Amino acid sequence: MQHRTEPSSIYAIVGPTASGKTALGVEVALRIGGEVINCDSVQIYKGIQIATAKPTIDEMRGVPHHLIGYVDPNVNYTAADWAADAAAKIREIESRGRVAILVGGTGFYLRTLKQPLFDSPKTDERLRERFRTIHSIKGAEYLYRMLSHVDPAAASGLPPKDHVRVIRALEVYFQTGQRISEIRPQRADPPEFASRIMTFALNPPRAILYDLIDRRTELHFAAGLVDEVKQLRAIGVKDSTNALGAHAYRRVCEYLRGERSLAEAIEKSQQDVRNYAKRQLTWFRREPGVTWLDGFGNDEGMADRVLNESVMKPAPK
């Protein structure tokens, strides 16, 4: 394929877990000469396989996929790290005359790519471990009250149970003495391609989606999820890492520590993922410029809808 004289649109296929984003992203890629860039915060990790829905070779259908399974699970890999890697990959793909297609459900990753974060301090692992211990003993609401005391403006913009971002805001305060709400506006300029990102969000029927999530979670456990976690722990991956903090992985760790039964771990994982899917939909509804697609990604004609919409509303140059 020859190099384009003008930059093309960059596609972002997003939506809740189990909505068929991979199938849609691959179909679009096949039609326009695209390559997929993973935009999922769990699929980035090596060895974290069964419950991540990483695309199989068959599902990729020959389409190149990038930023999957390349981060050590003990590494504290941030949204800013992903944004830097994704930006470099977009430029590399486009330099070969191909089209970049971002596929995944981590809305914060996509937002960070388009709107870079402020220059925050590197994570102090000892401090983070202290906050994680507080979270495990006293719960997310206790951490939220801590943040409300030291940085009420930051707390007001976060759900009380969003312990990951609450902990990060606390870390910034206790490491620097500055409130994250005051330094957050100090963002870098958006990358030159940000205005060319066209975002399409899948919106499948809620009841069908939840049923699919429940059945898929059961299949993950049946496929050896517990053994996978045992193997990861055996090679030194800690329960407190972001990798093993993912939904089903977190509940398996609790089961292995004797804190809940296997049946409870499965049921709680199902509830976690359903709740996560709901939060994903809420997140993308708050994002500007999203085109909504009712249905699953593998529904007939879905790729046509994406491509027709992109022709009707081309991304600004």
Image (cartoon, rainbow, N blue to C red):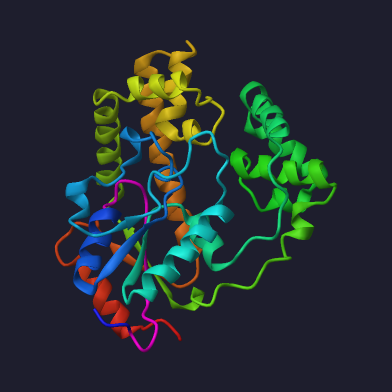
Residue 138, image x and y in percent? 67, 24
Above-or-below relation of 56 to 245: below
Which residue corresponds to the image point at 71% horizontal and 30% vertical from the top-left? 126
Above-or-below relation of 104 to 160: below
Magenta region, mostly helix, strand or loop?
loop
Magenta part of the protein: which range? 4-20
Which residue corresponds to the image point at 71% horizontal and 58% vertical from the top-left? 119
To which quarter of the image does residue 272 belong?
Answer: top left
Which residue corresponds to the image point at 44% horizontal and 77% vertical from the top-left? 196
Is 132 inside the magenta-drawn segment?
no
To which quarter of the image does residue 161 belong?
Answer: top right
Whether residue 221 is visible here, answered yes or no, is yes
Above-or-below relation of 209 to 241: below
Which of the two residues, 283 or 227, is positioned nearer the viewer here?
227
Which of the two residues, 202 or 43, is positioned nearer the viewer here?
43
Whether residue 10 is visible here, answered yes or no, is no
Quadrant where the image shows the C terminus: bottom left
Residue 120, image x and y in percent? 71, 53
Residue 45, image x and y in percent? 43, 40
In the picture, measured across the screen, residue 258 lies left or right of residue 133, that is left
Residue 109, image x and y in percent? 50, 56
Quadrant where the image shows the N terminus: bottom left
Which residue corresponds to the image point at 28% horizontal and 30% vertical from the top-left? 220
To which quarter of the image does residue 214 belong?
Answer: top left
Of all residues shown, which one is farthest toward the left? 300
Is 17 inside the magenta-drawn segment?
yes
Of all residues shown, which one is farthest toward the right? 177
In the picture, measured across the screen, residue 292 lies left or right of residue 188, that is left
Of all residues shown, which one is farthest toward the top? 258
Which of the two residues, 2 or 255, is positioned nearer the viewer here?
2
